[in-house]
Amino acid sequence: MLKKSVLLVFSFCVLLTHPFAFAAKPSFERKAAPYLEESYAALRSKQISAVDYALRVELDESSTSFAGDITINFNLTKNNKMPLTVDFDGGEVLSAELNGKPIQWKHEKWFITFAPELFLAGKNSLRIRYTHAFATAGDGLHRYKDQESSRVYLYSNFEPYNAHKMFPHFDQPDIKATYVLDVIAPKKWQVISTTRENKIEETADKKHWSFPKTPLMASYVFSLHAGEYAVWEDKAGDIPLRLFARQELAQYVNYKEWFLFTQQSFAFYNRYFNYPYPYGKYDQLVVPDFNSGAMENIGAVTFNEAYISRSPKTYLQRMRNNTVISHEMAHMWFGDLVTMKWWNGLWLNESFATYMSYLQMADNSEFKTDIWSGFYNDAKLSAYGADFQTTTHPIDLPVANTAEAFTNFDAITYGKGASVLKQLAIYVGEENFRSGVGAYLKKYANSNTTLKNFMDEVAKASGKNLNAWSDEWLSTAGLNTIGVKYNCANSGEKSVVKSLEILQVGTSTHKTLRRQRTQLGLYKLSYEKLMLQNSIPVTYKSLSTPVSDAKGLECPDFVFGNLNDWAYVKIALDEKQRNLAGPHINNFDNLTRRMLWEHLWDESLGSKLPLIDFVKFVQQNLAGETDQRLAASVVSRYATAAGYFWLMTNAGQDHKADLLEMERFVLQRLDAAPANSDLQKVLFDIYANIAFSPEGLERLHSYLLGKNLPQAFVVDQDRRWLLLRRLNQYAYQDYRELTDAEQKKDLSDLGRQMALVCEAIRPELATKEKWFSLLVAENSPYKFATQRILMRFLFPVGQNDLRSQFNGRIESQLPIIQSRNNDRFLAAYTDNLVSPRQCTLEGKDALAKVRDQYASLGPAVFKNLSNAVQDEERCVSMMKLMAK
């Protein structure tokens, strides 16, 4: 904080200038709301230009708030009617000066308003002194105090509309500005921002960090991070690299691998974009309590601590780490250098970075041989799931305000958009796509753009008119399905294709037919094995598309419509195809095999295949699966099926025998898994999550004590908490004593959280009452990161009787929580506590009633509850099919 003597001067200014009232009602009033409306932002961007900020912040180790001083230099168009507003949420304004003179202001809680007649047409210099509390929910300038060491760590997180929770400014992406930053901080702290400091001056107990002017940039990618971080250094060519993490996690940081992934990404992007990295250095920080996976702050990217593990990572975990590192780097060009004009462009920003991360890894990483299988598993499947929901939406859609932008961070934004961009590259030609991207970056560097700007450059590079393609793919929602129909006739001694056509249908709610390029795989059954005989690239658009290149080829026994996963589409198999694919599933290549497994899972979710048939199919075929990563994915679906069986059992359809068989099957596969393999680790985790029988719980108990473990398996600290969570959920044996002992051993922040979860998950009404009261309290003693994980585990499947004791009470808290202006908490609360799964029509109707009653509380509430209603309907349909 600033010194007390300075605050006395500030208070005198406040007496002179505040409170404030306009002499006459202005012709335009900004809506007093915690979000920014697009219509107002568009007006303000015409009013304001040539902005630069000089920001000074003072930080210390003990305070829960900080003081700041910002000077905003800008040009103002001639305007005597429209008040000027500066975004500033939650802090206290101490004084305001315009061109060196004190002026009046009005702080509307979410923004500061100034009368238009105060300002000159042309250049103005506005200085605001303020204080603000540190954030505790991850948005703004977040403060974290380590429970074990008492070290303090700060980091900023601003997307989509949270930078003004740290300092007053024009917080919208199309008012780009430069920043000069000065920070006073404790001597032992690191301070990190967009540029590298150019001067550090020491005082008795502090350091003054000075940072040079940044390039032109949007406010949401500016940053300030500070604290006693551990640091590692390297280079990517001539680009300085640094990696930061909490001292308490330093021993677990694989910094060499982190730098390797970073260097590989730089090597690819500098070549692919044909535009050198536009910023002077590249820092990456792994930070605590982070709300998302990572954030692309220019030159100072932040990552969730989930990317640091206290146990050796599996291949898939390492691959996902690489995709996130690469994704955030792609944003340096696409998103940071060239920035969307408004948040309706968010999808292109995120989708492009997602697609590029996989393209990079397919080019020069150790994961390149199966990276597109990873893309299908991690990006496409989530998108298919989101497109299945009634809340699906077009990829490109209007965003009226920043609250809607927050809600649109979903699998359509990331997974579907990336899948469609992959398809666009295939459709226009990958080199044409790359040329269009390069031209786009050069043309619009340091500017703001729209979707049309991007599509025009790709169209120009490819020579294709993409207007119809854009309408079909970007402006309409939903997912198409294709099937293949073919006829054969004898020709000499063999049967050949007489005709083959692709049949395309829309979904039940979205009838759009889309042009797309795919590959057909034609297979022949030979010596009891299905063998790929021919692959045919084809572009289709209509309801029925003849494939002339198939004529005269040897008649196939099986045709797959999306070989190598070019297309964003679901595949329909007729009865003959299904009957052939099932017994021969292990004959297909890895990616096709993965897609066929997902087809079976989709058939179960869509109530076309009884869930028990999927379970039996897994039990019959998993042992023959040679790819450990695919086997792990299949077992994850198997565990989800167990969750559905619990819901059906709670609803009156007894599946205890099936669940017991599933528990024993996973144990069998666990004992057979190769020692120290990734598959062994995945099976161990799944077994610990589904075991419920006395024998299963006793085995988990023995694992915790180091007995009867699978071959060469080591139960690390995080898996010890996994075992304890399950024992507490069933109140098995000495679970309290074991939990207390573990808590004393693991004093880390995560250890403390897990101990709380182990208590909250217990099957005791008094315990549920305690934690529910703490979660909904306005001044909860727990930070949001802890509250979120507690909400997730408070009412696990199997504790519906306890959850029913809170019917009405949980829902009645929604308006109260909404009034506290924490969208993240409200979304997590709605998703985890207000949406119990009962697998009954009564449960569905009750959820629909809650949804309709509270829909006005915000788009996230409506979306989460609508998805919950649909999930209930799906579960009921699956259960009805099981009853036949």
Image (cartoon, rainbow, N blue to C red):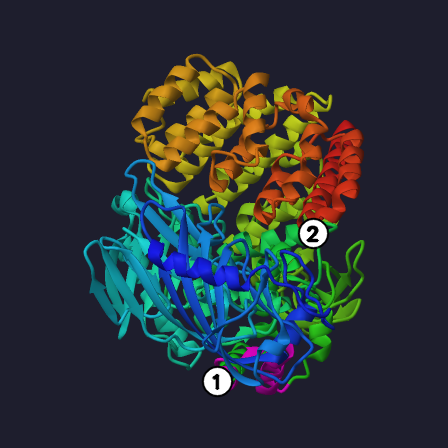
At x 57% / y 23%, what residue is drawn? 768
Q: Tell me which corner region of the image, top left, top right, bottom left or bottom right, holds residue 35.
A: bottom right
Identify the residue under disc 1: 442
- Apparent side of residue 675 relative to residue 760 in the rendered image (left or right): left
Sequence-first tag of 1 and 2 = 1
- The relative height of residue 624 versus residue 198 in the rendered view (above or below) is above
**For the residue labelled by badge 1, is the local secondary structure a helix, a strand or a loop?**
helix
- SS for callout 2: helix
**What crowding class fits label 1: few (fewer than 14 Cα within 10 Å), some (14-19), or many (20 or more)?**
some
Q: Which quadrant is the N terminus positioned in?
A: bottom left
Where 751 sits versus 821, above or below? above
x, y percent for residue 302: 40, 57
Residue 670 on the magenta segment: no
> Residue 843: percent from the left, percent from the top?
76, 31
Q: Residue 595 placed where, x, y %?
A: 59, 52
Q: Which region of the structure is painted magenta?
A: 443-463
- The CA distance from mark 1 to mark 2 is 37 Å
The residue indicated by pointer 2 is 859
For the question of whether residue 473 can be seen, the reply is yes
Residue 460 included in the magenta stretch of the image? yes
Q: Which-is-in-front pick, marks 1 and 2? A: 2
The chief SS type of the magenta part is helix
Nearest to the observer: residue 615 or residue 333: 333
Q: Amino acid at mark 1?
A: Lys
Foreground: 739 or 149? 149
Q: Which residue is nearer to you in this view: 41 or 238?
A: 41
In the image, is residue 222 above or below residue 442? Answer: above
